[in-house]
Image: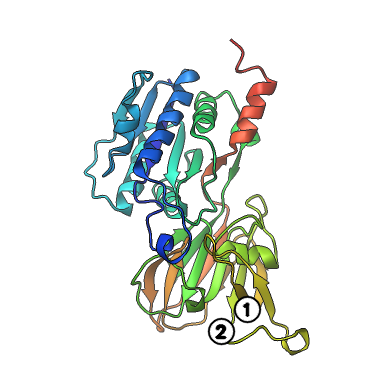
Amino acid sequence: MALVGIIANPAASKDIRRLVAQGRVVPDWEKVNIVRRVMLGLQSEGVTRVVGMPDSSHLIERAADDPNLSLDLQLLEMSALYNEGDTIRAAAGMSDMGVDCLITLGGDGTNRAVVKGCRTMPMIAISTGTNNVFPVLVEGTMAGLAAALVARGDVDLEDAAVRSKILKIYIDDEPTDIALVDVALSKERFVATRAIWDINTLYEVFLTRAEPASIGLSSIGARLQPLSMTDDGGLQYSLLDRDGPVPDAEHRDGQAYVRAPIAPGVVPIVAISSCRRLANGERVSVARRACTVAVDGERAFAVKPTQQLEIEVVRDGPPVVDVNAVLQHAAIHHLFDV
């Protein structure tokens, strides 16, 4: 029987960017509502086995408390510490259980933690975070329907999913971390407030994708060289310290100036000193200096000048399910007929 996993992050959309920008807040009751609609979509297509990650707000249990639902809901048996490690361990545990499709609620950071736990489960990522590129805005009911069709094997993943790219981070040739969308190097030497909200602290950025309709650091790359999830390779750009007005064209010395939405409601002019495409599997050595490394919008760790930092883009992430493609396939092949 098909088994679907659900990981919902109650902390998503509640970082500092909701204070320094116009970031949305998705309250717990709305996340419960989304999960309930996911469950109703699953149930309508005959999927009754669901496994969820325990969380501090009890989102999964509250969603399942509905007279219209008769799911066989199981919560992972794990000690919840209510941090990123919970998501990593939950994803690994669901993979071990043989979950056929995973649905997540969160932002780029939530999904990065999922991928750190497992890179093989097909995923449908619902956006409930602040700056989101990896997850998408999709109605929960539709996500549940698509997940059911994938979990039952009614839709071939070759036709309905794209294996995502990741950025691998190495320190002194040792694998250290990964990112799904962006790795940003900050001049600040301490992690402090984790969320990146001040563009002036950054000097170099690596991307797996740069789509014009995205928000955050990837939107800057999209103004320079658009790059989709299906395109191979990545993008690297360097930022320029800038004070005062934008110089006229004849005094720019080859530098680029772009206007990009780096956070909700925040659209500054950004000065770029260089930009280039990265080939798939190309490992880039970064100039040694003291810095902090931010992954998918959050500072994660500091690097010393004596350490060699390297970044590599590879197509080694999980299959990301295209909900529209799944539902179109199902309609064309009359999978919804009764």
Residue 121, given in percent of the width and then of the height, sits at: 47, 39
In the rendered view, tell whether residue 18 sits above or below residue 330.
below
Cα distance between the residues tagged 1 and 2: 7 Å
**Amino acid under disc 2:** Asp
Instruction: Pinpoint residue 72: horizontal percent, then vertical percent.
Output: 33, 21
Disc 1 crowd, CA 10 A, few/some/many (<14, 14-19, 20+): many
Q: Amino acid at mark 1?
A: Ala
- Determine contact: label 1, label 2, CB under 8 Å: yes
In this rendered view, identify the residue nearer to me: 129 or 238.
Answer: 129
Residue 226 drawn above or below residue 187: above
For the view shown, which residue lies furthest in the right direction?
A: 250
Q: For mark 1, what is the residue?
A: 271
Q: Residue at x 39, y 48 (%)?
A: 117
Q: Position of residue 323 (x, y in %)?
A: 58, 35
* Residue at (38% x, 18% y) in the render: 68
**Disc 2: CA contacts within 10 A as few (<14), some (14-19) or many (>=20):** few
- Tally of marks: 2
Left or right: 108 as drawn, with respect to 10 = right
The answer to whether residue 277 of the structure is visible from this angle is: yes
**Front position in the image: 72 or 251:** 251
Residue 95 visible to an observer of this rendering: no
SS class, disc 2:
loop
| Foreground residue among 244 and 147 | 244
Vertical order, 126 against 298 (above or below): above
**Of helix, strand and loop, which one carries label 1?**
strand
Which image quarter is the C terminus in? Answer: top right
Q: Residue furthest bottom?
A: 251
Residue indicated by mark 2: 241
Residue at x 67%, y 53% (from the top left corner): 231
